[in-house]
Image (tube, grey):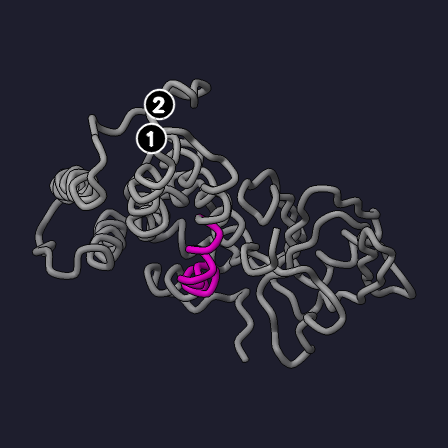
Amino acid sequence: MASGQRLFVKITRESLPQVKDKYPFVYLERGRLEIDDSSVKWIDAEGNVVPIPVATLNTLLLGPGTTVTHDAIKTAVAANCSVCWVGEDSLLFYAAGFLPTADTRNLKKQLELASNGEESLEIVRKMYAQRFPDAALVGKTLKEMMGMEGHRVRALYQQKAEQYQVGWKGRQFTPGKFELGDVTNQVLTACNAALYGIICSAVHAMGFSPHIGFIHSGSPLPFVYDLADLYKESLCIDLAFSLTRDMAGRYDKAKVSVEFRQRVVEMNLLERLSEDIPHILGVSDARRRRK
């Protein structure tokens, strides 16, 4: 796959950020992470060796084909560098590891906001205002705002169907039975899952919890779902109807993957997340290192 179609570029000595850059994420795949004279090094599939300055990184994203030594993990977390195990280009999130004594200020703040009714409702208003800046949200309850959102999303689906001249019978998804949906629903499901993986990695890396939400509840990753709604219109919904037209009724996994990655790159999703999450929660990200 061409580098322009990848969400993360291959790591090399030339592309590695300098110490002064304070880089938030580095993605690695098909290689080995180990220790060399008390520092972490990456050995890729071709045998190239790249030193990894974990003290200047927020997160290491370990993709397919990655092996890692015990000492490398110990050194990374001791430098307060999170480690996440992800799918190709971080499009699926599997697990995360952190130093037990890592800073928990952001997590505590998130808990305080979620447990306070008025403050939690204000967070909800900020999320909806970011999506619908012209909506009258003052004095609205959570139920009322969710009803407004449902109406707007249904209208958005219909608008996109008409724009791209695609038949639409509504959102349908049966867990474990991906193939039962029509092409539009299949693209929506695939893109949503990819978006959740990226957001989950970012949330963990910034010291927040994906399990403490403000709008969604009763699901494994409510905060991830809260945030995903901020970006779905362009990344998932518009793309699904556009690709349905282009694929002429036949789901093409490779095309969906390439087009989704391209949109993620174009909108600079990782940078937006690093700005949107602290803004929404009204915190200075304790783990985000600024230039």
The residue sitting at 11% across, 54% down in the picture is 137
Relative to 183, residue 29 above or below: below
User: Secondary structure beneath disc 2?
Assistant: loop
- Please, what is the dominant secondary structure of the magenta stretch? helix
Residue 126, quarter of the rendered image: bottom left
Q: Name the one closer to the observer, 271 or 162.
A: 162
Mark 1 lies on residue:
185
- 141 in the magenta segment: no
Q: Determine crowd level at label 2: few under 14, some 14-19, many 20+ residues with C-alpha closer than 10 A.
A: some
Q: What span is colored magenta in the figure?
A: 260-274
The residue sitting at 62% across, 58% down in the picture is 59
Where does the image place residue 236, in percent across and percent down from the top left?
35, 44
Q: Amino acid at mark 2?
A: Gly
* 37 relative position to 228: left or right: right
Mark 2 lies on residue:
181
Relative to 103, residue 163 above or below: above
The residue sitting at 40% across, 29% down in the picture is 250
> Would residue 71 be visible to someone looking at this image?
yes
- 270 in the magenta segment: yes
* 208 relative position to 122: left or right: right
Q: Name the one closer to the observer, 22 or 257.
A: 257
* 159 relative position to 212: left or right: left
Instruction: Determine the CA span between mark 2 and mark 1.
Output: 5 Å
Q: Are marks 2 and 1 in contact (CB under 8 Å)?
A: yes
Q: Name the one closer to the observer, 260 or 115.
A: 260
Where does the image place residue 289, in percent across and percent down from the top left?
55, 72
Q: Amino acid at mark 1?
A: Asn
